[in-house]
Image (tube, rainbow, N blue to C red):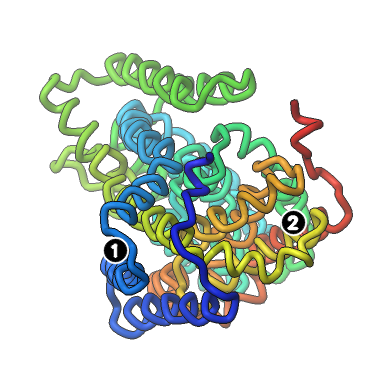
Amino acid sequence: MSPLSPTVLTQFSTKLAFIISALIIAIMGVTMIGFGWVPHLSLLLAICVLLAIGLYKGLKFKDMQAQMASGVVSGIGAIYLFFFIGLMVAALMMSGAIPTLMYFGFELISPQYYYISAFILTSIIGIALGSSLTTVATLGVAFIGMSHAFDANVAIAAGAVVSGAFFGDKMSPLSDTCTIAASVVGIDLFEHMRNMMYTTVPAWILTVVIFWYFSGQTVSGDLKQVTVLQSHLVASGLVHGYAVLPFVVLLGLALFRVNAIYSIICTIVSALVITYIHSTPSIEQLGGYLFAGYQPAENLELGDVGSMLSRGGMQSMFFTQTIVILALSLGGLLNTLGILPALLNGIKETLTNSGRAIFAAAMTALSINVLIGEQYLSILLSGTAFRQTFERLQLHPKNLSRTIEDAGTVINPLVPWSVCGVFISQALDVPVLDYLPYAFFCYLSLLLTLLFGFTGITISRLNAAK
C-alpha cells in the first residue's frame, strides 16, 4: 500500500467529513490570518483536534501515530532533498555562480521595454535564488524605486516583478515549493520540472507579449540604481565569468535525467572547486557557510546586494522541513480517520476523466490558498488528497504535481491575506489588488493547466509512461 494511502481506521459520511474539514480549515485560517500564527502552530492545533476526534471514535493513539508517520514517509524525499538544496544555495553563492548571473542579468534592463525587463530579470534572478520573496524584497524593491525615474506605472511594474519572481520560484531546482510538489506525488524533481515547462513556457511567452503591449509607456531615465547594484556585486569579489560553470553542471545533469540529489551533489562539488579558485575560506568558515548560509565579509559596503548574497545553508531549510513534516502528518490523519476518502467518495463519480480530475485538484489547491493563505499547505494537502484519484484514472503523477504548482505556488501572491500577498504588498508598498490584474504569468499558468486538462494536451498516462 502506498505511504500516501494509509489504512483507513474509521469511516465518516461525506457530510460529516465536510464539516470536520471546514472546522480544520477554519482553525488554521483564523489562527494564521486572524492571530498571525506561524503555520507550524496552526498545524499542530489542527492535529490535536483530529487526534481528539480519533480518540472519541475509539482509536488508539499508537495507531494514529503510525499513520501520521506513514504520511511523513510519503514526503521523506523532500525532507532529505531540502538538506542538499540548502547546501547547494550556499555553495552557489560563495562560488560566485549566483552573483555572476545577477550581474550579467542587470545588463538586460531597457528603459523602452521597462516592464519586459523587470519580468525577464526577476525571472532569471528568481531561478538563481530559488526564492520568490527574496527576489521581490531585493530586486523587486529596486524596480519599484526605478519606476518613478522612468515614469512607469508602479502597479504594472509590481505585476511584472511578481510574475517573474514566481516563475523563478516555480521553475528553480533551488525552490522549496518545486521540491515539495515533486516529492508529495513521488516523482523526481527534474521530471517534474520538465513536465511543468508545457504550461510554464507558454505562460511566460504570453506574459512577455502582454508586457510588450505596454512598452513605450515609460520615459528614458538613467540606470543609476542598476549601476550601483552591479558595482556592489563586483565589490563582493564574487563576479567571475567562469563562476557560472556549476549552473552548467546542474543543467547538463538535469538534461541527462540524472537523479536530483546526485545532480545537486555534483553541483556542490563543482561550486566548491570554483570557490577555491578565487578565495580560500578555512574549513571552519566553509562549515559555517554550509550550515548557516553564506555571509559576505563585514567590511564590505554592499547595500541591498548584501541581503541578496546572504543566502543558503542547511539551517535555512529547517522552517520549510518542519512545515512539511507537520502537514504530511495532518494528511496522514485526515486519510486514516477516513475524512479525505469520504470527501473524495462524494465526488468520485464525477471524476471520470483527466479534465475533471485536474480541475478538482486545481480548485482544491486554489481554495486552500484563498481560505488559509498558505502555499505549502495548498500543495501538500491537494497533492495528498488527489494522488489516488490520478492513479485510478491512470494519469501519471507528474500531471498532479504540475497542477498543484499552477494552482498553488503561483496563486498565493494573488490572495491579499496570504503569506506571500501580505509580504509582497508590504515590501513593494503596492496593494495586492493593485498589482493583481498585471500578474499575468500567475493566472495564465492556472488557465493553461485547466485548458490542457480538458483537451488532453500534454497529459501523460501511466500505461504510456511505462
Query: In terms of secondary structure, where does tag 2 sit?
Result: helix
Task: Give the quarter of the image for residue 160.
Answer: bottom right
Indicate the quadrant where residue 356 lies: bottom right
Q: Amino acid at mark 2?
A: Thr
10 Å crowding of disc 2: few (<14), some (14-19), many (20+): many
Q: Residues within 10 Å of mark 1 (few under 14, many from 20)?
A: some
**Which of the two residues, 185 or 155, is positioned nearer the viewer here?**
185
Which numbered mark, 2 or 1, is in the foreground of this view? 1
Which of these two is toward me, 45 or 334? 334
Q: Residue furthest front?
A: 58
Q: Residue 342, percent across and down?
A: 58, 68
Can residue 126 be seen by looking at this rendering?
no
Q: Residue at x 43, y 35 (%)?
A: 77
Q: Is residue 412 left or right of residue 129?
A: right
Residue 449 numbered tag: 2
Closest to the observer: 157 or 262? 262
Residue 99 located left or right of residue 164: left
The percent position of residue 142, horizontal first and vertical second, equals 44, 61
Q: Residue furthest right?
A: 455
Q: Which residue is mark 1?
A: 40
Which residue sits at x=42%, y=17%?
Answer: 266
Q: Is residue 85 left or right of residue 460?
A: left
Q: Is residue 464 above or below residue 156?
A: above
User: What residue is shown at x 46% (from left), y 64% (from top)?
Assistant: 10
Give the structural element (helix, strand or loop) at label 1.
helix
Going from the N terminus, do you reach mark 2 or mark 1 first? 1
Dot 1 amino acid type: His
